[in-house]
Image (tube, rainbow, N blue to C red):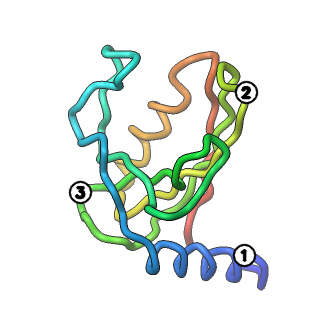
Amino acid sequence: MTDSDEAFWAALERLVRESEVVIDRHRGSAHPRYPNIIYGADYGYLRDTSSMDGGGIDVWRGAGGGKRISGAIVTVDLVKRDSEIKILLDCTEEEISGIMSFHNGSEYMKALLLRRR
C-alpha cells in the first residue's frame, strides 16, 4: 500500500468516525422507484456530508452493523449522469458481492470496487 493509499483510507476513516450513519433503506426493502430491486444490506448516508447528488455520502452497512470500513465503491450512473462514492461498512465478502451485483445489474449503472487491505 502506498502512502497516498494509506492517507485516503485514514481520511475516510476520520469522516466515518466523525459522522452519524443514517440508514434510510433497510436490508430486504425495495428501491423506492424500482420495486423489483431489493436491498441486500442496509443503505443510507453519513449525516452532514455531501456528495454529487446533493445528499450525504452514501454508505452500505453490512450485518456487522459497525463503522469498520470494508472498502468503497465508485459508481457511474448514466441515467442521472453522475458519479459517486459509496462506503462499505462492516460488510462480508458475500454482502460486497451482492452490493456489486446491485450496482452492476443494469446497463445504466456500473461500479468499481476499491478494496481495503
Q: Quadrant of residue 26?
A: top left
Q: Residue type at mark 1: give it.
A: Asp
Residue at screen point 77% across, 80% down: 2
Side of 109 relative to 20 (left or right) = right
- Give the residue pinned by disc 1: 5
- Give the residue pinned by disc 3: 63
Circles 2 and 1: CB distance less than 8 Å? no
The x and y percentages for residue 95 are 35, 47
Element marked by disc 1: helix
The x and y percentages for residue 73 are 58, 50
* For marks 2 and 1 on the same chain, the one whose residue lies earlier in the sequence: 1
Locate the N terminus by quadrant.
Answer: bottom right
- Give the residue pinned by disc 2: 81
Mark pair 2, 1: CA separation: 27 Å
* For marks 3 and 1 on the same chain, the one whose residue lies earlier in the sequence: 1
Q: Quadrant of residue 99?
A: top left
- Between disc 2 and disc 1, the foreground one is 2
- From this view, report whether residue 7 is shown above or below residue 96: below
The x and y percentages for residue 63 are 23, 57
- From this view, report whether residue 109 is shown above or below residue 51: above
- From this view, report whether residue 97 is shown above or below residue 29: below
